[in-house]
Image: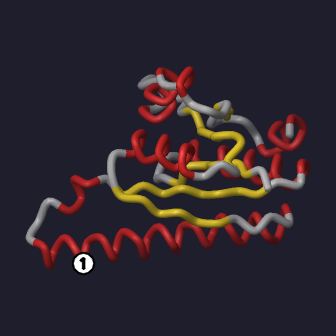
Amino acid sequence: MRKFLVVLDDSRECLNAMRFAAMRAARTNAGVEILAVIPPEEFNHWIGVGDIMREEARERIEAHFEVFAKWMRDKQGVDPELVIREGEPVSEIIAQVQEDPEIGILVLGAGTGKKGPGPLVTQLSRNSGSLPIPITIVPGDLSKERLESIT
């Protein structure tokens, strides 16, 4: 089954990327894989403290995922899967794409602020020529209605 890979993070634009991925998956009989990456700098503490922080980060990610997963199941009929990786976000996204042959499209949300589209969009756009799949960049300020009309 072809899957849309979407990145779960704390950005506002993540919401539109999730919506887009779920709507496209529902309309094309595909799946959604949600990837969350825990950056390594969160655990530069003593081993015991780092392990506790890692577990807390996983619990936060799983709780956040469940909000999106419930909406995807209830509104779109899509049952997403969660993958949690640890490392540098761009490297881990590329590794996930390369390791899972069912991933057909990477969906990213673009920020709308003065700082630009965001670090993931910027960095992955630079690497897009070497990725084995296309990237869909979803503007962070699209309305739900507009998303529905284009998916």
- 60 up-or-down from 4: above or below: below
Q: Is residue 40 left or right of residue 9?
A: left
**Would residue 47 appear left or right of 36 to someone viewing this image?**
left
Q: Is residue 31 above or below residue 57?
A: above
Q: Label 1 belongs to which residue?
A: 52
Q: State the residue in front, 116 or 129.
A: 129
Q: Quadrant of residue 132?
A: top right
Q: Is residue 126 above or below residue 14?
A: above
Residue shown at the point (26%, 54%) measured from the top left: 40
User: Residue 25: x, y in percent?
Assistant: 81, 52
Q: Residue furthest left?
A: 46
Locate the C terminus and report the quarter of the image it occupies.
Answer: top right
Compared across the picture, whether 150 is left or right of 108 comes to: right
Locate residue 23, reporting x and y percent. 82, 50
Q: Nearer the viewer, residue 73 or 135?
A: 135
- Residue type, label 1: Ile
Which quadrant of the view contains residue 119?
A: top left
The answer to whether any part of residue 139 appears in the image is no
Q: Is residue 110 above or below residue 31?
A: above
